[in-house]
Amino acid sequence: MKNTPFPEIKGNFGFGCMRLPEKDGGIDLAAFSEMADAFLAAGFNYFDTAHGYHDGLSEPAIRECVAKRYPRDRFVLTDKLTDEYFSSQEEIRPFFEKQLALCGVEYFDFYLMHAQNAAYFEKFKKCRAYETALELKKEGKIRHFGISFHDGADVLERILSEYPEIETVQLQINYADFDDPAVQGRACAEVCKRHRKPVIVMEPVKGGILARLPEAAEKVLRAGTQESSARFAIRYAASCEQVYMVLSGVSNMAQTLENVGFMKDFRPFTEEERELAEKVAAVFRGADLIPCTACRYCTAGCPKNISIPDLFSDMNAKTMYGDWNSDWYYGVHTGGKGRARDCIGCGKCERACPQHLPIRELLKKVSATFDREG
């Protein structure tokens, strides 16, 4: 882990606001406030959100729990321009101003072109989204400009070559899929190194999957270390070259305190720990799990209102643990919503998926496991 190239950022750990605590169908603002207090008190100050997180509730939660309660110079805030919220250049500025208002701030410290891949990049270019963001930076409404990225190294090479103004890149890096051909974490990190772009890590625990390993993988991990599986995963990501900060979407105070505790006194991975991570990853890859990170980008446009990440989680639990509760949770996750068998194969979910998963085929497998006629 490198020192931060941005002096306003304190520490090496960022508070991801994608998986905030929930209560009564909304964000638990009291719990989030306490978590934010603990995070800031520990010496960290970076919060990351996007308009679609928690179905639009993440940004207002930032306003209520952080922006209204702390002076602006006490926290660093990142927001993003997401594909589904604009269709022309003329729509970008009004949307941006709406985001500022929802977050209760007058500027964003970082503003990222969200979930960039080959298809999105073409749309963003056509709508001059990069150019508009750079204009907003000149006006002082954005302090730093970057991208979050979900595609192959060749696409990242193209984006960084065409827009050298990019200051930072947010990448998915974790030990389970660092060398996965779909994610290409290692190859993308090497592209960032060549272009001298510092890296923020997202999904270090792979949407929580690496915090609850299959039994065989957990056994391998315990043979080499006694630290928690989540801590092991986050330390791995933070130890990668080019990385100056790791984001984690914490959901409760216990996770917050654990993460800020070991990141405040960060200890880089040893060579022995890297070898252990590879052994665990090898077992993990053999478990035939669906590599969904529960980002929920797939659900917004589903015409059948299928809670795809939850159904994949049920399937993984069934695969990993033979979990009888999975059948019950499948009923919970399809109550008032679509079942896996209701998929009409429109493909909107696959176009939105950062992991490039064959969601339609996977839903067929989920349906074969859980759906019952009657």
Image: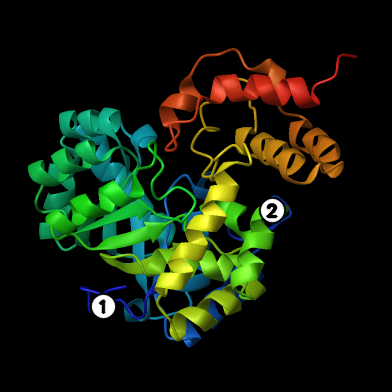
Give 298 or 320, whichever is nearer the viewer: 320
The residue located at (34%, 52%) in the rendering is 171
- What amino acid type should be assigned to the residue bearing mark 1? Asn
Give residue 188's position: percent from left, percent from top: 27, 48
Q: Residues within 10 Å of mark 2 (few under 14, many from 20)?
A: some
Circle 2: residue type = Ala
Residue at image coords 34%, 80% = 10
Looking at this view, name the residue that lies furthest to the right.
Answer: 374
* Residue drawn where x is 59% and y is 37% of the image: 290
**SS at mark 2 in the image:** helix
**Residue assigned mark 2:** 216
Nearer to the camera, 336 or 280: 280
Name the image quarter holding the C terminus.
top right
In the rendered image, residue 185, in percent from the top left (x then y), is placed at 35, 49
Q: Is residue 120 above or below residue 373?
A: below
Q: CA distance from mark 2 to mark 1?
A: 36 Å
Q: Which residue is mark 1?
A: 3
Q: Nearer the viewer, residue 6 or 229?
A: 229
Q: Position of residue 87 (x, y in %)?
A: 29, 28
Find residue 9 and report its horizontal and vertical position in percent.
30, 76
Horizontally, residue 134 falls left or right of residue 25, namely: left
Rendered image quadrant of residue 165? bottom left
- In depth, the one of 306 and 5 nearer the eye is 5
Residue at image location 44% in from the left, 37% down from the top: 355
Indicate the secondary structure of the residue bearing disc 1: loop
121 sits left or right of 217 in the view: left
From the viewer's perspective, tell me whether residue 321 is left or right of residue 328: left
Can you say which quadrant of the picture contains the N terminus?
A: bottom left
Q: Quadrant of residue 210?
A: bottom right
Of the two numbered discs 2 and 1 in the rendering, the one whose residue sits closer to the viewer? 2
